[in-house]
Image (cartoon, grey):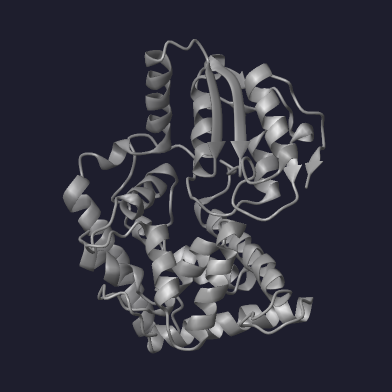
């Protein structure tokens, strides 16, 4: 898609209140899918994670390594899991940080991801409410955190009808959908929480500039109005990797469930994958998988470490069984290299010396 086309697509209201708004979402999803097919029809069946894992094995061989030592974060955990399934005899050490569960269905994965973002926002709101000059007020409590989420959601809904101003001169519309992307961008790491605090302060005063800047960083929009291929690639890979329902009613049911589980993010995350409904990106062979760079849940990490059957190659059995998964009690998208000496020590010892951590370790 062109830059202006992506601007429109990414600013589309994904919290529909009526049939007309839903029709716009459906139209934009179809348009995205048609552009993808028009520009990359021959390539589409090959962009799934299975083929990326095969490419990874080519790189391993080119480096002269008999076995792979691998650290995967977020979507990288999915790639690593596929590599272990396809080439179990070539794995030396495998670390999955922010693990994705390969067995979760496509729409259920969206719901889980939305819950992860909702949890991340609650952590941010508690931090903000305990600090000075928080736009939500002062005094962190369960009630005040809930009110903060509701106030932000009201802002997003209003901005979808009456966009905020923005001073970037990019021609973008500071709609609620784009502002929510900016919020999501800042929830990946605690280091960007101060930027989100400033952005929300301005947004509640009618200025969406900071949140649009954050969204552009997340979506890799260039100053000249073009985009890197992140949005296109992420959508295409996600579409190929798992079967998606064709029935719009099933998407509506999933959206309702996502809104109940994560009122702020549920609807936008489910509808954001709607281009996959067209089925134009079917792989050569359908296999279960699910790439997506979003906050992960502990339950996904536990399930991702289960032994799995491989295609004609027996089982990949993790060196560390599920009971010895290490956990980090902290905020952020992933754990390694995020300031926890406990996590870094465990991962380094395993990757370098194959020292397996003891079961049930909890880092803080």
Tally of numbered discs: 0
Query: How far across and how far down the image is residue 198, in percent?
Result: 53, 75
Which residue: 49% across, 10% down?
66
Quarter-of-image position of residue 362:
top right
Decide which of 50, 173 is in the foreground and name it.
Answer: 173
Decide which of 235, 117 is in the foreground and name it.
Answer: 117
Which residue: 78% across, 47% down?
364
Q: Decide if residue 318 is on the left or right side of residue 236.
A: right
Which residue: 38% across, 77% down?
22
The furthest residue to the front: 132
Does the image show residue 253?
A: no
Query: How far across and how far down the image is residue 361, in percent?
Result: 81, 37
Which residue: 59% across, 68% down?
257
Quarter-of-image position of residue 129:
bottom right
Quarter-of-image position of residue 126:
bottom right
Does the image show residue 115?
A: yes
Residue 4 sits above or below residue 338 on the image = below
Residue 156 sits above or below residue 69 on the image = below
Query: How far across and how far down the image is residue 107, in percent?
Result: 51, 57
Query: How far across and how far down the image is residue 235, in percent?
Result: 37, 52
Decide which of 124, 43 is in the foreground and name it.
Answer: 124
Q: Quadrant of the N terminus?
A: bottom left
Q: Decide if residue 298 is on the left or right side of residue 251.
A: right
């Amino acid at each position: 898609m062109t830059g202006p086309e992506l601007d429109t697509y990414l600013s589309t209201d994904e919290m529909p209140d009526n049939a007309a708004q839903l029709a716009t979402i459906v139209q934009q999803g179809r348009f995205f899918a048609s552009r993808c097919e028009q520009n990359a029809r021959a390539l589409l069946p090959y962009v799934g994670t299975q083929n990326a894992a095969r490419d990874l094995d080519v790189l391993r061989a080119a480096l002269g390594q008999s076995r792979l030592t691998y650290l995967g974060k977020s979507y990288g955990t999915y790639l690593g899991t596929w590599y272990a399934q396809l080439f179990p005899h070539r794995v030396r050490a495998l670390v999955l940080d922010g693990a994705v569960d390969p067995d979760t269905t496509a729409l259920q994965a969206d719901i889980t991801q939305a819950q992860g973002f909702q949890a991340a926002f609650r952590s941010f709101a508690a931090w903000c409410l305990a600090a000075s000059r928080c736009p939500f007020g002062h005094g962190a409590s369960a009630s005040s955190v809930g009110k903060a989420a509701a106030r932000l959601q009201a802002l997003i809904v209003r901005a979808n009808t009456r966009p905020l101003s923005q001073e970037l001169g990019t021609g973008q519309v500071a709609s609620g959908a784009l502002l929510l992307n900016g919020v999501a961008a800042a929830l990946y790491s605690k280091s960007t929480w101060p930027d989100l605090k400033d952005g929300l302060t301005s947004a509640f005063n009618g200025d969406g500039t900071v949140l649009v800047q954050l969204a552009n960083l997340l979506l890799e929009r260039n100053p000249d109005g073009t985009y890197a291929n992140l949005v296109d690639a992420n959508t295409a890979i996600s579409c190929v990797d798992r079967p998606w329902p064709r029935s719009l009613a099933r998407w509506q049911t999933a959206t309702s469930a996502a809104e109940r589980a994560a009122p702020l993010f549920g609807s936008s995350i489910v509808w954001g994958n709607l281009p996959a409904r067209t089925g134009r990106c079917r792989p050569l062979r359908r296999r279960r998988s699910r790439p997506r760079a979003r906050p992960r849940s502990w339950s996904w990490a536990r399930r991702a470490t289960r032994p799995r059957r491989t295609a004609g190659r027996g089982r990949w059995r993790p060196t560390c069984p599920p009971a010895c998964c290490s956990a980090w009690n902290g905020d952020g998208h992933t754990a390694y290299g995020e300031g926890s000496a406990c996590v870094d020590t465990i991962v380094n010892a395993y990757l370098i010396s194959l020292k397996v951590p003891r079961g049930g370790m909890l880092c803080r």
